[in-house]
Image (tube, coloured by chain):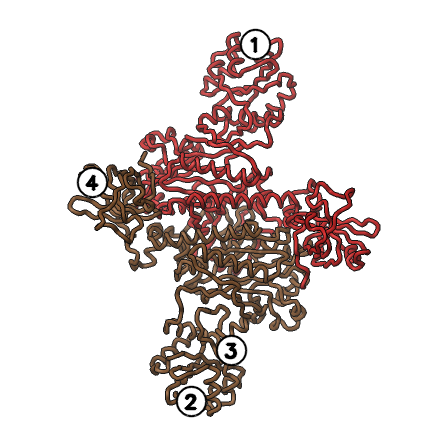
Chain colours: A brown, B red
């Protein structure tokens, strides 16, 4: 159908266009009939404009307007006129004008949508939103989010291009080298019984690009992990992947700070100060109980082990004696918390392993609470000093093994901050976390695992401990955190075959296994490998922060549910037997006894 | 190892730096020992510089230099000095200076590479290049190619951003909707017996983004086809994918011309004139025998059916009588081709179905050749006129069904152009091919198939013929061609459910089948769908043209072979039984009787 093509976008009309004949294309956002005169809000990507369909201007247009419903697609011709002063809409950029329709064409009808597009705060069930994603994406908040996402990617690309990075593509059909998360597999038709894997990250390829001498690489790339999904995970996600050669980590970090600062300034006008604060892993764990601390507020953890280790309070002293520790948080001004309030907090901590939450309220009359009596004057004074306690404060303590103390008090810190409204919502607090341990011991598998990945370079002077004392080896690794999220993680990489072999050995790989899985990398390292390192950012997570959304699904155009399904296309779905036959595979139904 | 970090890149040193102490990081590109003084060519991404290691400046550095070999990675400190006038190397941008090494650090050793990196024209077996891809990519030609690729993608993104396109990402784990090529499948762990498919293109998603009101979308995106690979195909390839709403096709085409013009100007300084010539599909087939003509040279096909249909030459007359045609090409100045030369051409055409190649040589004495005697004076004169024959020309004819004539003469045209050196190598000839038929009849399956895809909008006035006369329906489709390649293909899309349903019916889908496979699209079309259309470009192919490479494998960093393998990582490969078990699949070995 040859329809009237737009001369303008709806949202761009202003008083400057008064008197002009314009053509618009868009959706009927809203429709009101005021005594035979029909007012349409017509919407396109640029915004909304009011169109008046009055039989006095055009009988035909008014007749058609009468048949229009919300979300119909129309082409409109008409004249831009100034609105009467008393009908000006100050909330709309186009609110001073309206368009008097002389011609209306109906391009496409619409059934009544399952939820309204024009009510910004409509509370719609997420499964309905996901099934009708194409309608959900019409909503203003979603349009804004994806404009931010677009803008962020453009800023990233411009920044990296200007800094000499080359955008290079790595394969999606790769080799399965399972370590950490599960691979998504792709059966091969040509090679019977062989499988490709979708990349969990382009880690090996970007390192090989460094071996190739490209020196500065970046890619905004899809990655895949077949994991059980938590609320903030997706089976496919987008990574900003970066690798450099011959660049000291401090220089890389400073470039990345500058990039992040550009992104936040250019997409949402937020000023990110640089350089970012730096915390060692140990410091972050000590002060915040986590390696991705939310630094928008204080409420730090305070180690009181040395004060209470010899106290009469058996719970504290006992925890210390069995190798644990005692730490506290000062909930400022919460001395009036009821026993019930504290019970709620205690329950909140149970999933994190804390067996209890001890408390001391600081009142005018001094310290009160069931455990106060166990402490000497001296101990009480030192506790107050350590926690900077003042009248009106509530001191909360957990005594346990270090990891339990960290996790439970770290979570308590976040909960208190939310409950007490301590988090400045329009602030972004960035930091680098450095000096990670290289390994963590996996009790279940009885072996060491890489904290980051098996290609992370140990701190130079720790390399000899790879074989003798893996637990004490520090990694040349760094994470970027913001508001309690890890948004990027990177490291210097091993670039010498012998070190890489020691690393594999420390991880419990036999020589044969290392060679079978990573032989091509080990071989590449023998042909002149530059010192190199890089970083990878979670783009979805960054966009989530920029757009102030609380869910990764809101920043991915067509996301998957927690069972890795697409509710709109119903993927994954059944396939023809012929397809499976060509791929030399068959489905093996699990028996009821399987688990 | 704390090594000496670069102050400069090798390729950027000039006489301006003479007298400065510099630090360089890079690879030993070449090494010569001239009587105890060692000359190193040191290479990094930016280029090459000569480093002189003379025991007079530093005994230590000269000693170490003695142990260096090609492709070792080094850090060098030294002073930039002017070369003696007689040792200036005019072929090197850094050729007027050299660096006197005072310190050399060996960062990484290298075995002797399987092929030399520093000999640009070394003829290396491609399987060796692919196995050691990380070394192949070090070679100058490859580095240049990927810099061009990077530059092209940046130009594309800037252009599209400036023109209001949003970069939006579509899923990689999608639903299998087989039509045309085979899907790559991904078994689901969570949904037993269900599979994702990797996208052959984001076609449906980009159309849904138009339903969502984004109006202008682009993405540089990986696509997958599990086809038997020809020399110029890859299982995964990169597409520049574009879709617009409310935009007439001519406006889209003109934007795309501008974009292509920008790409060629900014990457290789080539001026592409716009607007591009336009040829209808029929015109392209008539004049060039193909819908992707190489327009860098003439040598057009000429239809002589009307001249020879009643001639005495039975082969010609008979072909016409059985519904075929007779067409010719004028090979200018080839009248002296020997019988053997012509036999070679005849053999060349056999794979394309031509049963013979008739010829007439135009000599001083007039037309000669075995078939001349069958034609009347009048017929000879008209043939000469039609083919613009002059003394010295060789007229070549094929008589057969139209498709055989087109393919064989189209191929003959290309071969003659190559043999006669008629192709200006440094020229790019672009054109649009328009007015494609909507369907092609698949004899084997006994049904119509979409020439482009099932979402292509028919020409308005042909829509009613969808059910009555599908063969005559024209598509609102357009391909961009360059130098004999299709580099882009697009169309306006169907945006009304009833038209889409008619289209599916014409393709032989039952209503149930259409709904099962594309139900979500049909449903989306019911909620207000804008008129829309788009295009997709083969990015790999465009880069191939820009970089003047003759093989897609040369413009993909880590390509697959024709059996869809990666020789470097040995993907696809075996996986653990446990992985398959979790995915509820097993491998079914094909029996020897299978085919």
**Chain containing mark 4:** A
Decide: few, some or many residues near mark 4? Use Cα within 10 Å; few <14, some 14-19, many ≥20: many
Name which residue lies at 46% across and 31% down: B275
- Mark 4 and mark 2 lie on one chain; the one further toward the N terminus is 4
Q: How many numbered discs, if any?
A: 4
Q: Which residue is mark 2?
A: A372
Element assignment for label 2: helix
Element assignment for label 3: helix
> Badges 3 and 2: C-beta atoms under 8 Å apart?
no
Name which residue lies at 50% across and 33% down: B481
Q: Which residue is mark 3?
A: A402
- Mark 3 and mark 2 lie on one chain; the one further toward the N terminus is 2
Q: What's the CA distance linking mark 3 and mark 2?
A: 23 Å
The percent position of residue B195, horizontal first and vertical second, equals 44, 52
Q: Which residue is mark 1?
A: B373
Mark in the foreground, 3 or 2: 2
Q: Is residue A192 visible?
A: no
Decide: few, some or many residues near mark 1? Use Cα within 10 Å; few <14, some 14-19, many ≥20: few
> Badges 4 and 1: C-beta atoms under 8 Å apart?
no
Q: Which residue is mark 4?
A: A62
Q: Is the same chain shared between marks 1 and 3?
A: no
Decide: few, some or many residues near mark 2? Use Cα within 10 Å; few <14, some 14-19, many ≥20: some
Question: Which one is nearer the viewer's eye here, A397 or B364?
Answer: A397
Q: What's the CA distance linking mark 1 and mark 2?
A: 123 Å
Q: Is the same chain shared between marks 4 and 1?
A: no
Q: Which mark is residue A164?
A: none
**Chain containing mark 1:** B
Left or right: where does residue B30 sit relative to residue B522? right
**Chain containing mark 2:** A
Mark in the foreground, 1 or 3: 3
Q: What's the CA distance linking mark 4 and mark 2?
A: 80 Å
């Amino acid at each position: 159908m040859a329809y009237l093509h737009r001369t303008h976008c709806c949202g761009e009309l202003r008083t400057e266009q008064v008197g002009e004949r314009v053509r618009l294309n868009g959706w009927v956002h809203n429709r009101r009939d005021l005594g035979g005169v029909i007012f349409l809000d017509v919407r396109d990507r640029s915004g909304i404009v009011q169109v008046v369909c009055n039989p006095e201007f055009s009988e035909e247009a008014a007749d058609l307007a009468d048949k229009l419903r919300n979300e119909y697609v129309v082409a409109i011709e008409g004249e831009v006129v100034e609105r009467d002063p008393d009908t000006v809409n100050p909330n709309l950029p186009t609110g001073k004008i309206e368009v008097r329709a002389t011609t209306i064409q109906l391009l496409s009808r619409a059934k009544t949508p399952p939820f309204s597009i024009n009510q910004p705060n409509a509370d719609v069930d997420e499964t309905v939103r996901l099934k009708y994603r194409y309608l959900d994406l019409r909503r203003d908040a979603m349009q804004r989010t994806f404009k931010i996402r677009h803008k962020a990617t453009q800023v990233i690309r411009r920044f990296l291009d200007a800094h000499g990075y080359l955008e290079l593509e790595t394969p999606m059909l790769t080799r399965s080298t399972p370590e950490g998360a599960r691979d998504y597999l792709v059966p091969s038709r040509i090679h019977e019984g062989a499988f490709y894997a979708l990349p969990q990250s382009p880690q090996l390829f970007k390192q090989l690009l460094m071996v190739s001498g490209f020196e500065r690489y970046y890619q905004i790339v899809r990655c895949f992990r077949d994991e059980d999904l938590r609320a903030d995970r997706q089976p496919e996600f987008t990574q900003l992947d970066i690798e450099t050669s011959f660049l000291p980590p401090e220089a890389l970090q400073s470039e990345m700070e500058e990039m992040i600062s550009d992104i936040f300034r250019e997409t949402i006008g937020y000023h990110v100060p640089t350089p970012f604060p730096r915390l060692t892993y140990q410091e972050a764990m000590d002060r915040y109980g986590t390696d991705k601390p939310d630094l928008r507020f204080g409420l730090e953890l305070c180690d009181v082990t040395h004060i209470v280790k010899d106290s009469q309070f058996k719970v504290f002293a006992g925890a210390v004696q069995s190798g644990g520790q005692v730490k506290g948080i000062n909930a400022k001004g919460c001395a009036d918390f009821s026993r019930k309030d504290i019970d709620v907090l205690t329950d909140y901590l149970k999933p994190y392993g804390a067996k209890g939450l001890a408390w001391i309220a600081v009142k005018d009359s001094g310290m009160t609470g069931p455990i106060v009596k166990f402490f000497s004057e001296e101990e009480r004074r030192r506790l107050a000093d350590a926690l900077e306690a003042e009248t009106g404060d509530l001191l909360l303590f957990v005594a346990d093994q270090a990891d339990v103390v960290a996790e439970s008090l770290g979570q308590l810190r976040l909960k208190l901050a939310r409950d007490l409204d301590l988090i400045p919502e329009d602030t972004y607090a960035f930091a680098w976390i450095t000096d990670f341990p290289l390994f963590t011991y996996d009790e279940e598998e009885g072996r060491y695992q890489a904290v980051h990945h098996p290609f992370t370079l140990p701190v130079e002077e720790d390399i000899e401990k790879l074989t003798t004392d893996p637990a004490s080896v520090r990694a040349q690794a760094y994470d970027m955190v913001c508001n309690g999220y890890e948004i990027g993680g990177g490291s210097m990489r091993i670039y010498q075959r012998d070190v890489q072999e020691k690393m594999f050995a420390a991880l419990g790989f036999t020589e044969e296994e290392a060679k079978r899985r990573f032989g091509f990398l080990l071989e590449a390292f023998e042909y002149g490998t530059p010192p190199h390192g890089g970083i990878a950012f979670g783009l979805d997570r960054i966009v989530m922060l920029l757009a102030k959304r609380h869910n990764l699904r809101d920043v991915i155009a067509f996301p998957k549910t927690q069972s890795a399904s697409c509710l709109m296309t119903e993927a994954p779905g059944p396939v023809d037997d012929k397809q499976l036959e060509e791929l030399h595979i068959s489905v093996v139904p699990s028996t009821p006894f399987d688990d």
